[in-house]
Image: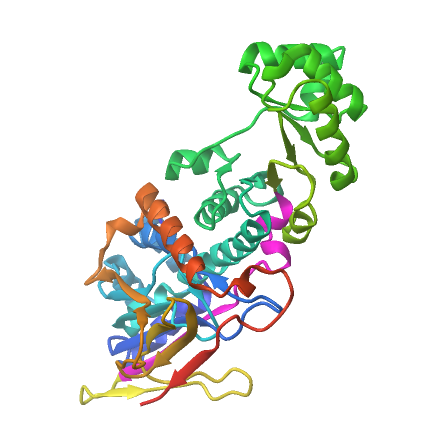
């Protein structure tokens, strides 16, 4: 699918004006970063990089799109001519997908002509802002869940393509499975699902519904037991499936209190190995509240796909350096109050202590060393227009999941707590 019109009108009018002034082809450096984390969050998670790279490969303008731009007088004939052969030919580097980030981390660096970097801006930001918000929320949920698996099941709460992106981002942050089949097909993710309340209501009795599900899916399936009376639902489930029943799902009521007595009831009935899955508008705080309850897994929907109150990572994309007519590099920066940026291309490392725990995010306008243990954060993603294929598709998701897990292990333990606070490590900016 062509991705080139997933952009803002003003990107192309800027292109037109720059072509007119002769500045469009000036070598330039843009950076994507977040000035701050969402209020109270201790860290963010980079996600969407693989999806962005996949879309970048199809960022071309076909005849139909060019006709639309021309017929609607979005841009002039000169700009249409430029877009006919548009292809990103520059370099992109950035934090590996799954990596943690902090305020002002240079998450993506785009080196190309102004024209090329300008045209891809909106597409790049729309993906990174959405997916990073979802992954950041998902990471907090995983921290609350501990060793208990989380299932992504928010597809019906968001746009159909956003649902695929959310499932992918959640898996990068540590979710074990998703209900979304398209995400499973595209990215090799594990998909799960059994039945909804409508399946029970379809049948004349709850017992008949359970018998039908068991006959079709086997005794190790998970039965939804709260369509009517929970206690009777549990008893009926055990009567139908016996001690081999895989699990029961609770989707309403006081889940902490309910999970406790359902566990006791299952054990009294001899179903010691039957697991309990809970759903119903869970977020990281609800999951944390269930830590002491005898719950085996969590199904998370609405809160996950909306970033648990923070649906965007608020990343921005700024020109930080350009060449002048003499070919000299000039750092440039925005000076507006509360929105100032730092000019010059950035380099980033994570400073570590002797136990390999993160101490600071060190960002510099020159290559440097902290004088102690450190880890480079920036990796090449695109070179001369050629995309590093190890970051896309199912292999890219696996790589990002591993990166996220390793990065989380570097953080101080306080990062996993739900208390609001400042970023868990400081950002240190070194200029010059």
Q: Which residues are magenta?
A: 301-322
The residue closer to the viewer here, 159 or 417, is: 417
Q: Is residue 258 left or right of residue 399?
A: right
Quadrant where the N terminus sits is top left
Coordinates of residue 70 in the picture (x, y in percent): 37, 59
The residue closer to the viewer here, 396 or 72, is: 396
Q: Is residue 83 above or below residue 25?
A: above
The residue closer to the viewer here, 185 or 138, is: 138
Coordinates of residue 38 in the picture (x, y in percent): 58, 67
User: Magenta includes 169?
Assistant: no
Q: Is residue 173 left or right of residue 159?
A: left
The tally of labels here is 0
The residue closer to the viewer here, 345 or 232, is: 232
User: Magenta includes 311?
Assistant: yes
* Displayed quadrant of residue 355: bottom left
Q: Is residue 254 above or below residue 356?
A: above
Residue 310 visible in the current orientation: yes
Q: Is residue 265 above or below residue 123?
A: above
Coordinates of residue 210 in the picture (x, y in percent): 67, 14
Q: Is residue 52 left or right of residue 270?
A: left
Residue at the spot 69% in from the left edge and 41% down from the top edge: 293
Coordinates of residue 54 in the picture (x, y in percent): 33, 50
Quadrant where the C terminus sits is bottom left
* Displayed quadrant of residue 140: bottom right
Residue at the spot 57% in from the left edge and 15% down from the top edge: 219
Residue at the spot 59% in from the left edge and 41% down from the top edge: 154
Residue at the spot 77% in from the left edge and 35% down from the top edge: 258
Residue 72 visible in the current orientation: no
Q: How is the image coloured?
A: rainbow
Direction right: furthest residue: 229
């Amino acid at each position: 699918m062509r991705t080139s019109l997933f952009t803002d009108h003003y990107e192309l009018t800027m292109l037109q004006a720059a072509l007119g002034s002769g500045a469009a082809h000036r070598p330039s450096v843009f950076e994507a970063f977040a000035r701050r984390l969402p209020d109270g969050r201790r860290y963010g998670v980079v996600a969407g990089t693989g999806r962005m790279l996949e879309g970048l490969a199809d960022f071309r303008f076909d005849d139909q799109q060019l006709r639309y731009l021309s017929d609607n007088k979005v841009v002039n004939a000169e700009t249409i001519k430029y877009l006919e052969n548009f292809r990103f030919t520059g370099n992109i580097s950035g934090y590996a997908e799954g990596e943690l980030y902090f305020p002002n981390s240079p998450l993506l660096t785009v080196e190309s002509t102004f024209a090329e970097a300008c045209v891809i801006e909106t597409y790049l930001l729309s993906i990174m802002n959405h997916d990073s918000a979802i992954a950041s929320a998902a990471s907090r949920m995983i921290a609350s869940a501990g060793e208990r698996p989380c299932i992504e099941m928010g597809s019906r709460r968001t746009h159909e393509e956003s649902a695929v992106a959310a499932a992918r981002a959640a898996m990068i942050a540590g979710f074990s499975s998703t209900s979304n089949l398209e995400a499973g097909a595209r990215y090799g993710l594990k998909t799960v699902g059994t039945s909804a309340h409508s399946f029970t209501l379809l049948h004349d009795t709850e017992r008949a519904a359970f018998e039908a599900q068991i006959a079709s899916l086997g005794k190790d399936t998970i039965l939804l037991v709260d369509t009517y009376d929970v206690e009777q639902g549990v008893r009926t489930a055990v009567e139908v499936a016996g001690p081999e029943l895989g699990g029961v799902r609770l989707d309403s009521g006081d889940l902490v209190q309910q999970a406790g007595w359902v566990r006791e009831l299952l054990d009294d009935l001899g179903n010691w190995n039957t697991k309990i899955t809970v759903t119903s508008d869970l977020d990281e705080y609800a999951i944390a509240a269930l830590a002491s309850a005898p719950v085996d897994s969590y199904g998370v929907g609405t809160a996950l796909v909306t970033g648990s109150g923070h649906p965007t990572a608020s990343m921005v994309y700024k020109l930080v350096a350009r060449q002048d007519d003499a070919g000299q590099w000039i750092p440039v920066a925005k000076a507006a109050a509360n929105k100032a940026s730092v000019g010059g291309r950035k380099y980033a490392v994570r400073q570590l202590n002797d136990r390999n725990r993160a101490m600071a995010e060190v960002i510099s306008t020159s290559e440097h060393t902290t004088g102690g243990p450190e880890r480079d954060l920036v990796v090449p993603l695109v070179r001369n227009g050629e995309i590093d294929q190890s970051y896309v598709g199912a292999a890219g998701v696996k790589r990002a999941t591993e990166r996220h897990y390793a990065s989380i292990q570097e953080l101080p333990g306080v990062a996993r707590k739900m208390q609001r606070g400042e970023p868990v490590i400081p950002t240190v900016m070194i200029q010059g």
